[in-house]
Amino acid sequence: MNRLTSSRDELLKLLGQGAGIVERRQTLPILANVLIQHNTQGTQFTTSDMEVQIRLQAGEAVQTGAEDAAITVNMRKLLDILRAVAAGTVTLEWADGKMTVRAGKSRFSLQTLPAEDFPLVRSASDFSNQVLRLPQKLLKRLLGLTHFAMAQHDIRYYLNGMLWVADGRQMHLVATDGHRMTLATASLETAVERREIILPRKTVLELSRLLGDEDDAMIDIALASNQARLSLDGLEFTSKLIEGKFPDYQRVVPKGHRNMLLVERSTLQAALQRVAILTNDKFKGVRVNLEPGLLRLTSINAEQEEAQEEIDIDYGGDSIEIGFNIAYLIDALANMPTEQVRLEMQDGNSSALFTMPDEPNFKYVVMPMRI
């Protein structure tokens, strides 16, 4: 009989960190499980989908029984049980293909699968000795500014992820779906050789969830030719990389636009959300008319219904009429933590550039659409 005893809150915290990559429906039933291992180094919990793996080191967990013990059990069921029972001590016992969970006067019996069948992600052999180190809070902010522009299920598989470029003392994060692009830049503590990687979409979203907001919390990033390993707060996050040639993001950023205006972010966002009411999934176009002193937003749907909003602005440039996918504009404004946004445009046929006055290292480029 193998036994592991811990506080319910400690187990909930650990399993909650690893649960994000566990899919409810798996081609391999064991991938719905969490691997629990105990040895002389302590107790570890591991989840995997064969592309991404999260390994967590337990702090308070106490195991008795065999010195080396390992088992897998359904992650969702174990999490649901822990959420339902009262706070206090929880004991996990397993033997002969069954695990018993005890908490207070509650008792649950779960099926298990052998630990040796769990498909761990094999660590790459060519990890660089050079480790990127930066604050978690900073990386979380950069991911928040860029993640929404990643593609989903695009046949250009390299767009279903995010480009990370480390070069000297700068790190660039770039995401695009071919119609819009986000670019955010941060400074590194020490200079590094140039490296480019493309992290999968799932890795980016899960990492955003796991990163902390504490000022002194750091993350270490080690890179191999086909893998990235990210270490933070007793958690080791291993992810395969996407192979492919990412678009040249520097050529996409427009330069020299002669028409520029500042607008209140919340005002523009609210106006776009109201105009979006009369759009639909098949047609999300919004017509933007820019003229001295006025910004007009118009949407017309297939039933010839129309919505229009006008915003008074401080603008004295060219009169421009241009169409955009309204969802692209709303996404950007929802993820820009600033009171004002700067909009730069050349004419009705060129891409528009959104920036934040107080954030020179962020750029959002959106292509026009025909309306």
Image (cartoon, helix red, strand yellow):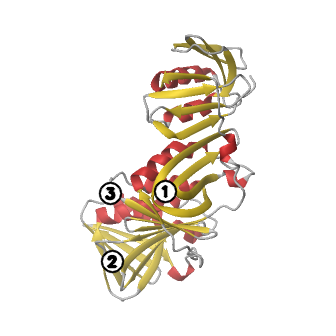
Chain-order first, disc 3 or disc 1 = 1
**Image position of 370 with respect to 48: above or below:** above
Chain-order first, disc 3 or disc 2 = 2
How crowded is the residue under tag 1: few (<14 C-alpha within 10 Å), some, or many (20+)? some
Q: Report the side of 272 relative to 267 (left or right).
A: right
| Residue identifier under label 2 | 4
How crowded is the residue under tag 3: few (<14 C-alpha within 10 Å), some, or many (20+)? few
Under circle 1, the secondary element is helix
- Nearer the observer: mark 3 or 1; the answer is 3
| Residue identifier under label 1 | 207
- Quarter the C terminus occupies: top right
| Disc 3 from disc 1: Cα separation | 18 Å
Residue 114 visible in the shown view: no
| Disc 1 from disc 2: Cα separation | 28 Å
The disc at residue 261 is none
Q: Position of residue 161 (x, y in %)?
A: 62, 53
Under circle 2, the secondary element is strand
How crowded is the residue under tag 2: few (<14 C-alpha within 10 Å), some, or many (20+)? some
Who is closer to the viewer here, 178 or 53?
Answer: 178
**Image position of 11 with respect to 337: above or below:** below
Residue at image location 52% in from the left, 52% down from the top: 205
User: Amino acid under label 3?
Assistant: Asp
User: Amino acid under label 1?
Assistant: Leu
| Residue identifier under label 3 | 216
